[in-house]
Image (cartoon, rainbow, N blue to C red):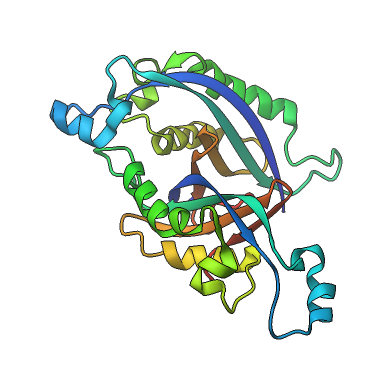
Amino acid sequence: MVYLTRKLEFSASHLYHNPALSAEENRRVFGKCNNPHGHGHNYTLEVTIAGEPDPVTGMVLDLKELKEILDREITQRMDHRFLNYEVAELKNQIPTCENVARVIWNLLEAKIPQGHLHRVRLYESADLFADCYRSGAKGTAG
Amino acid sequence: MSESLHVALGRRYHFAASHRLHTTKLSEEENSRVFGKCNNPYGHGHNYTLEVRFSGPVDPATGMIANLAELDTFVNERVIEPFDHYSLQDDVPAFRELVPTTENLCAEVFKRLKSFPAAKLEAVRIEETSNNSFEYEGN
């Protein structure tokens, strides 16, 4: 098994607010992330595909193809968007790193034509990230 | 795929500490041979980067595995405050006998963080420099 990882960056804004909680509770739970007009991040996404290299091409998955899938599914949907208001998949969810990573997993998993999606790691900043993976895979790249 | 989907939260922290690799189980010559420059008698320091990963269910009310402020307080109290700007073998009791390599440091940090109540500690990864990193999953 070989693990191939492709990285991409996108910038987006968001805010954390749960309408089921009072204004005070929202403030207490989410702190600055509850500021009403939102704020933004430069997100870094790492997508890891696991598979056996094709004996003819030597590739697990053609990187050009992966790049197109990531561009269509993630960049076009999320880059320079306000995640709460413009990404339908995040409607009624708090757009935390955990939830955005899970949405990205769900957008990508069925679209990988060769190999399979092994891990999605989404960095909201250099010091905060979320991993998504199937049981047994853990958060490691390989 | 039938296997269930897991979500883990990763957080990085930074601390600076000094250490000296030396063991009383070896002679002076053997210490010098085994540990090289890291055995220099007055020690030396690193800017360590600590990465911790916690897994668990995402709370639908908050979208989070664990409240970040609670996690930061927990890690700061148990690891960053007792380690930052200290000498590992002189100021951290676990390293009075144990060589403060980053392998041993990972295990000590894991021991200090595994009781975090809100989520399960999956792994501790420490970068001693940008070229060396060590990871421990508790087994």
A12 relative to A142, above or below: above
| Side (left or right) of A35 relative to B7 | left
Residue A44 is drawn in which quadrant?
top right
Residue in the picture at 60% in, 36% down: A46
Residue A134 at x, y = what percent? 50, 51
Residue B136 is drawn in which quadrant?
bottom right
In front of the other: B99 or B117: B99
In front of the other: B80 or A125: B80
Residue A111 at x, y = what percent? 57, 32
In front of the other: A55 or B120: B120
Residue in the picture at 57% in, 32% down: A45
Residue in the picture at 51% in, 46% down: B13
Residue in the picture at 75% in, 32% down: A62
Q: How many marks?
A: 0
| Side (left or right) of A74 relative to A6 | left
Q: Farthest front residue?
A: B42
Residue A57 at x, y = what percent? 85, 38
Q: Quadrant of the N terminus of chain A?
A: bottom right
| Side (left or right) of B11 relative to A39 | right
Inspect this view and state whether residue A142 appears: no
Inspect this view and state whether residue A10 appears: yes
Residue B67 at x, y = what percent? 32, 44
